Image (spheres, rainbow, N blue to C red):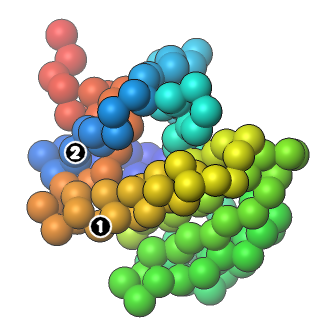
Amino acid sequence: MKFFVSFLFLLYAATALGQASFPKGFKLIKGEHPIGEDDMYSNGKDAFQMHFFSRAYENDYSWNDDGYKQFMTESFGFPMYRTKDSLLWGTGKINNYYSYVVVDWHGEIFELFSDYNDADFSFYSNWLLSSIREYRKKGKVFMFQKMYDFYYKPRV
């Protein structure tokens, strides 16, 4: 039921979706899932990926509330923090790679990961957070290409 409601919301909000424009050098690495749930964007060193944990969250999702913040902390294995504008973010090391996660206002989860915790990782972490905010200022939702295509482009 929650998936159906989420689907209807996204269908209703389709005009507000915005395909993410990644920094120069990042290319789409298509996954096997038809709507892009396992797609990544990578420059060969750093990679961005979306996650869909919110579908598994059993309680009502409410604007990155404390329950969801704790759920995300347990899911990723590092602390999550809430920004002044109610985004969730966290960073840590998982299975020998560095991870930076942002949860937007709609519960969409974006992860940057890399083998290196260097200046590039820091730059792209900042880029991710600021891009999500910039899309919102423009009245759009930051979204990966296949997800954007699935919800926005007409089906033939």
| Residue under the point 62% across and 86% down | 66
Dot 1: element: helix
Residue 18: give its label: 2
Would you say 92 lies left or right of 107 here? Answer: right
Q: Nearer the viewer, residue 85 or 153?
A: 85
Residue corresponding to mark 1: 133
First-in-chain label (2 vs 1): 2
Would you say 119 lies left or right of 41 here? Answer: right
In the picture, residue 21 is in which quadrant? Answer: top left
Q: Position of residue 33 (x, y in %)?
A: 55, 21
Residue extending farthest to the right is: 95
Residue extending farthest to the bottom is: 84
Mark 2, Cα crowd under 10 Å, few <14 / some 14-19 / many 20+, is: many
| Residue under the point 44% across and 23% down | 28
Mark 1, Cα crowd under 10 Å, few <14 / some 14-19 / many 20+, is: some
Q: Nearer the viewer, residue 147 or 41?
A: 41
| Residue under the point 47% across and 56% down | 123
* Residue type at tag 1: Arg
Q: Position of residue 139 (x, y in %)?
A: 14, 62
Would you say 33 lies left or right of 8 here? Answer: right
Q: Nearer the viewer, residue 57 or 32?
A: 32
